[in-house]
């Protein structure tokens, strides 16, 4: 049989202010992502989170993966909020430097009008192509 097709993949962790994004998603739509926003603390002291991880929660899923420019990808999915709600989420990640110093992300949850973006202050993302 022929070898499996090569995949584009985005992986890494980073933070813009009090918002962090951990992501590991392939163009085959396999993988996971997690957003933690410490700007929104719950009454029990935990931060707001949104998680896509089909192996842990079958109601969540990666729905699309698109290369939007050199080193940049857009991942869309269905995420579980820490409150239990399911929401659509769109994440753009750009791998702009090997060190991570110029990497960026944009996170949007349209239902809530939520958006955060910027250059990461810590961490590193890698976008690998076949």
Image (spheres, rainbow, N blue to C red):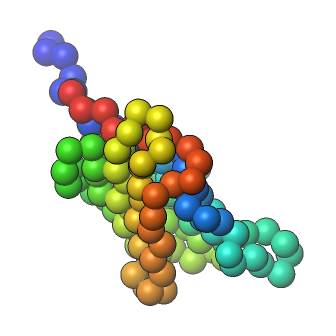
Figure disc tally: 0
Q: Which of 129 and 18 is in front in this view?
A: 18
Q: Nearer the viewer, residue 23 or 97?
A: 97
Q: Which of 43 and 39 is in front in this view?
A: 39
Q: Where does residue 48 sit, x and y in percent of width and height?
A: 67, 72
Q: Against 115, is 98 above or below?
A: above
Q: Where does residue 117 sit, x and y in percent of width and height?
A: 44, 68
**Is 14 positioned to the left or the right of 105 in the image?**
right
Q: Which of 111 and 80 is in front in this view?
A: 111
- Quadrant where the N terminus sits is top left
Question: Which quarter of the figure has residue 115?
Answer: bottom left
Q: Against 96, is 52 above or below?
A: below
Residue closest to the far left: 2
Residue closest to the far right: 44
Q: Against 70, is 75 above or below?
A: below
Query: Can residue 129 be seen from the camera position used here?
Result: yes
Residue at the location (70% across, 69% down)?
38
Question: Which quarter of the figure has residue 41?
Answer: bottom right
Query: Can residue 11 be seen from the camera position used here?
Result: no
Residue at the location (46% across, 58% down)?
119
Q: Where does residue 55 sit, x and y in percent of width and height?
A: 52, 46
**Is 49 positioned to the left or the right of 64 in the image?**
right
Residue at the location (83% across, 81% down)?
43
Q: Where does residue 130 sit, x and y in percent of width and height?
A: 21, 27
Residue closest to the far top: 1
**Is 49 positioned to the left or the right of 78 in the image?**
right
Residue at the location (59% across, 48% down)?
122
């Amino acid at each position: 049989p022929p070898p499996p097709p090569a995949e584009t993949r985005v992986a890494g962790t980073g933070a813009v202010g009090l918002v962090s994004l951990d992501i590991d998603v392939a163009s085959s739509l396999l993988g996971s992502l997690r957003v933690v926003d410490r700007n929104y603390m719950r009454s029990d002291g935990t931060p707001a989170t949104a998680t896509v991880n089909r192996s842990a929660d079958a109601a969540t899923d990666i729905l699309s993966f698109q290369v939007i420019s050199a080193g940049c990808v857009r991942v869309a999915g269905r995420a579980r909020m820490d409150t239990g709600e399911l929401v659509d989420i769109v994440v753009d990640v750009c791998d702009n430097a090997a060190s991570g110093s110029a990497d960026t992300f944009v996170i949007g949850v349209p239902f809530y009008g939520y958006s955060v973006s910027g250059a990461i202050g810590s961490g590193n993302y890698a976008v690998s192509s076949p």
